[in-house]
Image: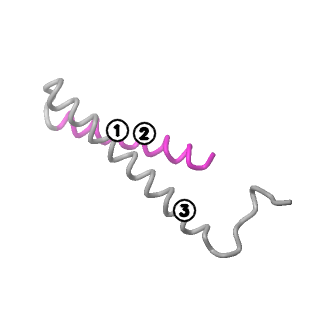
Amino acid sequence: MSRRGALPVDGSERDGAMKNWRYIGMHAVAAAAFIFLLQRFALSATLESSLLWALTFGGCAAGLAYAQSNR
């Protein structure tokens, strides 16, 4: 009988946490790059506006990925 919520004894918990942070970072960068390219080239927005939207969407994507990884 095993418990799903039990912490591993061999220290592999840290490896799992690093994978989560890597996943969150990649998710944020991908969303920011997508919205930047969309705003800048498809919608012909200014550089400042595109960067602001990229920062906003990247932050939201990071928050969403963080919430999903802790599920």
Question: Residue 56 has which mark?
Answer: 1
Which residue lies at the image location 38% right of the left edge and 50% below the top edge? 26
What is the basis of the colouring in this image? one colour
Instruction: Tell me the tag on residue 17.
Output: 3
Q: Residue at x 40, y 53 (%)?
A: 25
Q: Residue furthest bottom?
A: 10
Residues in magenta, as a range: 48-71
Q: Residue 18 versus residue 56: which sits nearer the camera?
A: 18
Q: Which disc number belongs to residue 60? A: 2
Q: Earlier in the sequence, mark 3 or mark 2?
A: 3
Nearest to the observer: residue 45 or residue 70? 70
Q: Choose between 69 and 44: the one closer to the eye.
A: 69
Label 2 Cα neighbours within 10 Å, binned few <14 / some 14-19 / many ≥20: some
Q: Position of residue 51 (x, y in %)?
A: 22, 40
Q: Quadrant of residue 31?
A: top left
Looking at the picture, does residue 45 appear above or below residue 14? above
1 vs 3, front mark: 3
Q: Is residue 4 left or right of residue 50?
A: right
Crowd class of label 1 (few under 14; some 14 to 19; many from 20; radius 10 Å): some
Disc 1 residue type? Thr
* Residue at the extreme right of the image, as rendered: 1
Dots 1 and 2: beta carbons under 8 Å?
Answer: yes
Amino acid on which the number 2 mark rests in the picture:
Cys
Report, in whole angstroms, how far the alpha carbon at label 1 lies from the one at label 2: 6 Å
Whether residue 55 is in magenta: the answer is yes
Residue type, label 3: Ala
At a point 42% along the width and 39% down the height, the residue shown is 60
